[in-house]
Amino acid sequence: MENCIEMQNISKDFGDKVVLKDINLNIKRGEIFGLLGPSGAGKTTLIKILTRQLKQSDGIATLMGIDTRELDQNTYSNLGMVLDNVGLYERLSCYDNLNLFTKIYNISKDRIESVLAKVGLLEDKKTTVMKLSKGMKQRLVLARALINEPKILFLDEPTSGLDPSTASEIHNLIVSEREKGTTIFLTTHNMEEATKLCNNVALLHEGKIVEYGNPKEICRKYNYQNKIKILLHTGETVKLENDETSIELISNYLKSHIIETIHSTEPNLETVFIELTGRSFS
């Protein structure tokens, strides 16, 4: 599978403040890639470099083989973006907001209703943006990013501050876009979201990548305890070796119907991040 996004030694500084240091990443076509880190780690800065809103201080980045410093209108027509700055027109309806972008992209208005239906806003197409809830606005921003059927979708904290139900709906939309072959670049500090959605992630700390790989493989890599943790109905927690020495005891527990839950001691991404950096995402 060919790379859709490539970064070689990308660095960015603002005067004396270094925000990104030697970022090297390849993102394949049709992949959901997650850039993970706390606020201030440099996630949004990297997206802005990839979309030519900022120029890197050093290094080379390409989208679909094109140097990001030379992106033109043809390239932008293949991009969709959900960024911090919402940029919706509050006094216009959902339909009219999207209609502006059909004119910018020179595409048919016929796309509007199908995209609104996809994000669950078709019945609200005549509602002005100022009357929408935060979750509905976020779905409209996503609809705007999808209106041109992009090949690459940049999502900067797309579910930040949303209730679990709305976040889950957006997750489903992201997965459906991936299934169509869209390459998705996602930034988040939500570790569960990243584990659920991403093919690969990079953990970003103070502008440097401290770990990269498939989320579940990263967690297994740092599973030093390699034990099985069993919670019994009595409230007692038992830790057993994750090997053949525990088979008989686990079998007896199962036969006695006294197991409440059973888990491995595998850490989650946030635990790994804390181990590598000494700080949490909160």
Image (cartoon, rainbow, N blue to C red):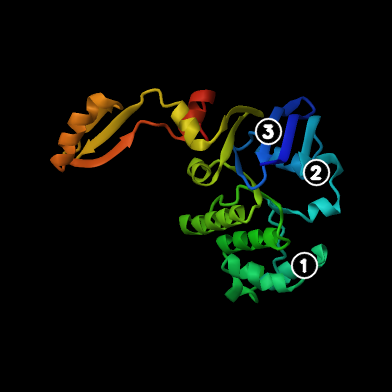
* Cβ–Cβ under 8 Å for marks 3 and 1: no
Looking at the picture, which amino acid does disc 2 mark? Answer: Arg
- Provide the residue designation for mark 1: 102
Q: Residue 52: which disc?
A: 2
Q: Is residue 196 left or right of residue 230?
A: right
Q: Is residue 92 left or right of residue 261?
A: right
Please state, as top left, top right, bottom left or bottom right, where the N terminus lies in the image: top right
Identify which residue, 270 or 64, lies in the foreground: 64
Look at 72% across and 58% down and name the residue there.
87
Q: Quarter of the image holding residue 102?
A: bottom right
User: Quick one: label 1, few (<14), some, or many (20+) residues within 10 Å?
Assistant: some
Query: Which of the marked residues, 2 or 3, is nearer the chain's N terminus?
Result: 3
Which residue is outermost to the left? 256
Across and down, in percent, residue 150 comes to: 71, 56
From the image, tell me which residue sits under label 3. Answer: 25
Mark nearer the N terminus (2 vs 1): 2
* Amino acid at circle 3: Leu
Q: Quadrant of residue 69?
A: top right
- Please tell me whether residue 126 is drawn above or below residue 247 in the rendered image: below
- The image shows residue 47 at horizontal and vertical percentages of 71, 42
Residue at (64% x, 48% y) in the render: 30
Residue 129 at what x, y percent from top left?
A: 65, 68
